[in-house]
Amino acid sequence: MNPQIGALFVQVAYIAASAAFILGLRGLTKPDTARRGMQLAAAGMLLAIIGTLLNHEIITYEYIIIGLVVGSVIGLPMGLLVPMTAMPQRIAVSHMFGALAVTLVGIAEFLHYRDVPGGPGVVKMVALGFETIFGALTITGSFMAFGKLQGFISGKPITFPGQKIINAAIFVGAIGLWIYLIATQSGGPGAGADNGVLLFGLMTLLALVIGVTLVLPIGGADMPVVVSLLNSYAGLAASATGFAIGNNILIVAGALDGASGFILSILMSKAMNRSFANVLFGAFGGEKAAASVKSAEGLTTRSISAEDAAMRIGYARNVIIIPGYGMAVAQAQHAVRELAELIEKRGGRVRFAIHPVAGRMPGHMNVLLAEANVPYDHLFDLEEINEEFHTCDVALVIGANDVTNPAAKSDPASPIYGMPILNVQDAEQVIVVKRGMATGFAGIENELFYLEKTSMLFGDAKGVLSQVVSEIKGL
């Protein structure tokens, strides 16, 4: 292919890919267009890959083919076999791999300029330092988040005396090395010298340490926000990589990823009534949570059977279902859909109340319910449904905990005080499906479980809801 025609085709492919990414993001804003949005984004990524493979600067395809094969071998099982309950962990691992790629590119580019007179120049050195620092801290930070979500690292905040000062010193040290490298490696006879390589390596090592020390003191309840924030860091690092190697699609895609991840982090923090500073340094789920647990001593719950629950739900005219992480763990979404259809056949109305941070990631419940073919128009966000609970005959809570806790409104001492919750306590009757009385991610008792109007239906959500469905069919 003529080099000029090839270069033109690459740029056209990049422009088309950028447009597909933007339209894909737009499609993800609504449940009924989300699938099309994902398809557009995937098509955009395919175009970006094809355009890159046709770049005239590529000398050999051997390593590229090896990379494609290895990536496919790893990515295909991750996409097909990882259950929805583990999706946040999978996303954290994906960020880790993306950040690893960005960091390796930054290191390779810096080493490349060792033999180039004058070094990388100021602009490229700024980009190389930025991508390497944020890429490296995202590698270890994402791994720590994965560990906390998966459970092999404690979900409780891990702190030690002087931690914030040490973290700040490490971060300042990394930034200081970056500034020094910009000053000494961007031009002149000293550019690319061996001491520069040593300092660049030290800067990278400090960034890796920052990722660990940044996430360790953050509690498991805040991991979804942390994963979203790390997504933003990875996107910004990728965008900086685009500037460093002159790749337009990386600049666009990285900027979109960085901006969307940052906005999502803001929305999630708002949904939990938290600030970024509180998420990153507040040690959520620590001593305050333990103090709140004691307030449940002496209180009792009221347990019911599947038959009793069927009587209440089967004759209800207005039912609101509140899905949570317990539904995801039990893979109960299909039983929930069957129950909803049965209620509607009997003349009742069913709606699903979706909290922004229900489950372990935004949209977690929406995806599970869509997988079970629950109609999109049955799903309502917190702002749309909250005023409807006072007209509700039965509110059916399935594994949701912190997002239904009245302490967020009534107890100033609670660590979730001020967090917007679903007003389940306003319903005429509340039925909570739960395995046991374990606390949620925030590590505190849910006052809803001890109200007189609340009945507990203990057991695996999929099993007990199937029993409820059978009982209702027999009414």
Image (tube, rainbow, N blue to C red):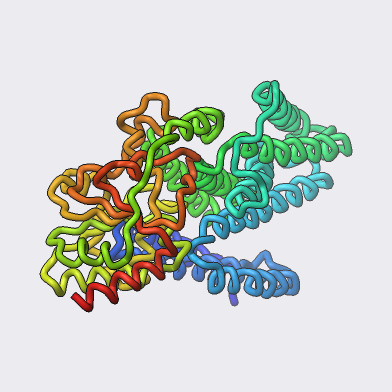
Choose between 39 and 74: the one closer to the eye.
Answer: 74
When the figure is inspected, residue 199 is found, relative to residue 50, above or below; the finding is above
In the rendered image, the quadrant that contains the C terminus is bottom left
Which image quadrant is residue 180 in? Answer: top right
Tell whether 82 sits left or right of 431. Answer: right
The residue furthest right is 194
Give the quadrant of residue 425.
Answer: top left
Q: Residue at 80%, 47% (x, y): give it.
A: 111
| Res. 35 visible in picture | no
Q: In the rendered image of this protein, does residue 395 appear above or below residue 14?
A: above
- Left or right: 320, with 228 as reference point: left
Front-most of 259 and 115?
259
Q: Residue at x 41, y 56 (%)?
A: 434
Residue drawn at x 41%, y 34% as measured from the top left = 416
* x and y, in percent, of residue 359 in the image: 43, 53
Q: Position of residue 386 (x, y in %)?
A: 21, 45
Quarter of the image with the N terminus in it: bottom right
- Residue 293 visible? The answer is yes
Above or below residue 244? Residue 23 is below
321 and 393: which one is in front? 393
The residue drawn where x is 69% and y is 71% is 70
Count of number-bearing discs: 0
On screen, residue 248 versus residue 267, left or right, reads right
Name the spot of residue 384 as percent of width and height, x first. Answer: 20, 48
Residue 443 appears at what percent x and percent y?
A: 50, 40
Q: Nearer the viewer, residue 454 or 144?
A: 454
